Amino acid sequence: MTAAWSMRAADALLRREPVVGTRWAYEWATLLKGVDQVRRATGDQRYLQYIRSNLDRFVHDGAIATYSREAFDLDSVAGGPLLLSLHRETGDERYRAAAQVLREQLRAQPRTPSGGFWHKGIYPDQMWLDGIYMAGPFYAELAVAFAEPSALDDVARQVTLIAERTRDERTGLLRHAWDESKRERWADPATGRSPSSWGRALGWFAMALADILELLPTRSAQRDRIAPIFRETMAAAMRVQDEETRLWWQVLDQGGREGNYLEASASAMFVYAAAKGVRLGHLAPTHLDSARQGYDGILRRFVSASADGDITLHGTCAGTGLGRRPDEPDMTYRDGSYEYYVHRPLETNDHRGLGAFLMASVELERASGTR
């Protein structure tokens, strides 16, 4: 019997890439979160050891090597759930102490006038959809664990604020980011929204909401605020699922337009969020049908398997952002236009895409009864 795709892909990763990163970073944190979900589904301790060996390269007596709180980068918080998971599994207090380091960043994180977390210290007054995934589930997990209702309220505030300010009224999709100050060149002068609905940005947001909802108490005001946003987000995403391939486009509402392409990481993220949303009771069962079709599309178009058991994921968009760093030349400015997104290169075995694929695989295997 052929092993499930989640284990096949995870085992190939363990063989191919024993060390996944040289700096504390969200890309490999996303990958290891996928591995952690395979671990939870299978109970295989090889995956726990893999995660632990990679995090132990950074976590030392409560400090996190190469991490800078002063950067106020929400991407740096993405590893928080891994630290909490390792603390639960091992009891090692180093992981709890390191998680508290990230929690302290959130306490001090600069905010927009409306109370939204800046995405990074170098991007004043900007909220990006990505940041809800980077910080939201970790923030919610800590708030539940330590009974901090005000922190749970803040999680809901972050979600509702960015959803309100980035939603495109025409499509129901969310734009990549919002600049409350409206100073950035990419910001609409009236709304502060960025110009495009980028697939992976909305994928991050959808996954974040699915994960946050799983953590919240069944009866809570925060759940009542977030669940409708999740349903609206997924309904909009399903409306732009490609009819032929059942995948999702790099620029979501421009399917078939010249230059646009079907993209692996966003497709895996929507599959994961849809399947999990159905399991948690927040989405109608028809979303599971769409998730299965999307997953089959991923396997057909983006996944290849070699005779020696290596599994390769193709078709993931490279790192993508907005604006520029203060020390970068103006010619590097990322304007958030359609042309910017469709000219982003594609990567093979990108950590973001592979992590999302592992998560999607576990959810669909669970739905089919193979987990």
Image (tube, rainbow, N blue to C red):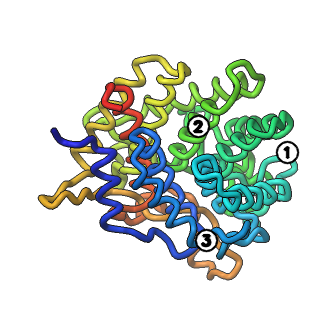
Nearest-to-viewer mark from 2 and 1: 2
Residue 252, x across and y down, in percent: 45, 43
Q: Quadrant of residue 220?
A: top right
Residue 156, x across and y down, in percent: 75, 35
Is tag 3's residue or tag 1's residue first in the polypeptide sequence?
3
Q: Name the residue at 42% across, 24% down.
A: 287
Q: Label 3 vs label 2: CA separation?
A: 25 Å
The amino acid type, in three-letter code, at marker 3 is Phe
Secondary structure, mark 3, is loop
Residue 302, x across and y down, in percent: 27, 51
Q: Is residue 257 visible?
A: yes
Residue 341, x across and y down, in percent: 47, 58
Secondary structure, mark 2, is helix
The amino acid type, in three-letter code, at marker 1 is Ser
Label 3, on which residue?
A: 58
In this picture, residue 75 sits left or right of residue 292: right
Pointers 3 and 2 in contact (CB under 8 A)? no
Question: Looking at the image, which residue sits at the far front?
Answer: 91
Disc sitting over residue 211 in the figure: 2
Front-lying residue, 200 or 176: 200
> Looking at the image, is 303 positioned above or below residue 329?
above
